[in-house]
Amino acid sequence: MGFLFAGRVLQGVGAGLAMGAATASLVENNTSASPRFASSAATVSTAIGLTAALALSGLFAEFIAMPLVWSYVVLLGLAAMNIWLLALSPDDRPTERRRWRPQRPRVPAGIRLGFTASTLSVALAYCVGAIFLSLGAHMIREFADTESSALIGVILACSSATIGVTGLLLSRISAHASVLAGAIVTLLSLVLMAAASVFGSLPLFFGWCLVGGVAYALAFTGGLGLINRLAPAQHRGASLSPLYVIAYALQAGTAIGVGAIATGGSLADAVLVAAVVLGGMCVAVVALIVAARRGGHLSGV
């Protein structure tokens, strides 16, 4: 278990170093006519990785010897390929070299309302995703009365595949509209999640997979698109960093919280508490977007 915790900590460090810079790079190297291409590309790439991970890990666990070993061999190969591609990419370091120093993340005063809306939107997607990944397999086992890792992996992968397909269709939708739609569809997905838990229904769970996938794509793409359009170019990385810090912190709290409730109580209790709390976040996102629009903070976004 010690090695597992150490590996997860290092994975978190790697994601923290890469995510903000990668998103900013997508914006700065965007060759598409659509300014929303970067946020859509981030959504689709995340969905492709998650779909492949869920489906392949389930198939490995069911049909291949030493599935834990081979899963990490595949990841190691992908990491090596990513490093190679990064080495071939154009050098974007500034001509004037300065000594690197850690900087406190900061958000320019003029975009703080929009930043709050975009951060909560991304966090909403992450939190629902945390529930899905932490409790989804248990719900499938209970509802379908199955121990098939391959079946569980494929069902879970349907949600992330839906995220990717939806992400491909969002490049023409305005960021604020995507955030607003994401909050509303997430609320619907939470109703399906709670209903699936109460009735022990696999069809309702599958409906949650599909609707939740659409909601994730809308909320995540819209949140990133909103902050990418609002943040000045020189502050883009500094604005993306606190967004990811807050979103990941809320995701971690959600995963730990629902796990603790499910362990101390029941799976249904954990799902219902999460649905109520995240439903409140959905209402907060809608209220922030409406306030920002009325205050003229989202003109042209």
Image (spheres, helix red, strand yellow):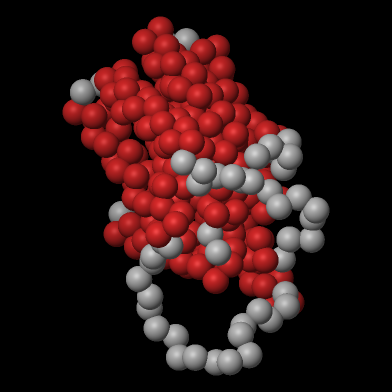
In terms of depth relative to the viewer, which is nearer, 174 or 164? Answer: 174
Q: Up-down: is 69 above or below 286?
A: below
Residue 114 place in picture, x, y as percent = 47, 47
Q: Up-down: is 54 above or below 91?
A: above
Residue 281 place in picture, x, y as percent = 37, 32
Residue at the outermost left position: 264
In the drawing, does residue 108 fall left or right of residue 87? left
Q: What's the residue at 35%, 71% (across, down)?
A: 104
In terms of depth relative to the viewer, which is nearer, 118 or 26? Answer: 118
Say which quadrant the C terminus sits in: top right
Q: Is residue 283 visible?
A: yes
Q: What's the residue at 59%, 35% (across, down)?
A: 178
In terms of depth relative to the viewer, which is nearer, 296 or 47? Answer: 296
Q: Up-down: is 294 above or below 82?
A: above
Q: What's the residue at 68%, 34% (across, down)?
A: 166
Say which quadrant the N terminus sits in: bottom left
Q: Quadrant of residue 218?
A: top right
In terms of depth relative to the viewer, which is nearer, 227 or 298? Answer: 298
Q: What's the residue at 60%, 54% (across, down)?
A: 229
In the drawing, does residue 50 fall left or right of residue 183? right
Q: Is residue 3 visible?
A: no
Q: Quadrant of residue 250?
A: top left
Residue at the outermost top position: 199
Residue 171 place in picture, x, y as percent = 72, 42
In the drawing, does residue 72 fall left or right of residue 119? right
In the drawing, does residue 240 fall left or right of residue 169? left
Q: Up-down: is 30 above or below 154?
A: below
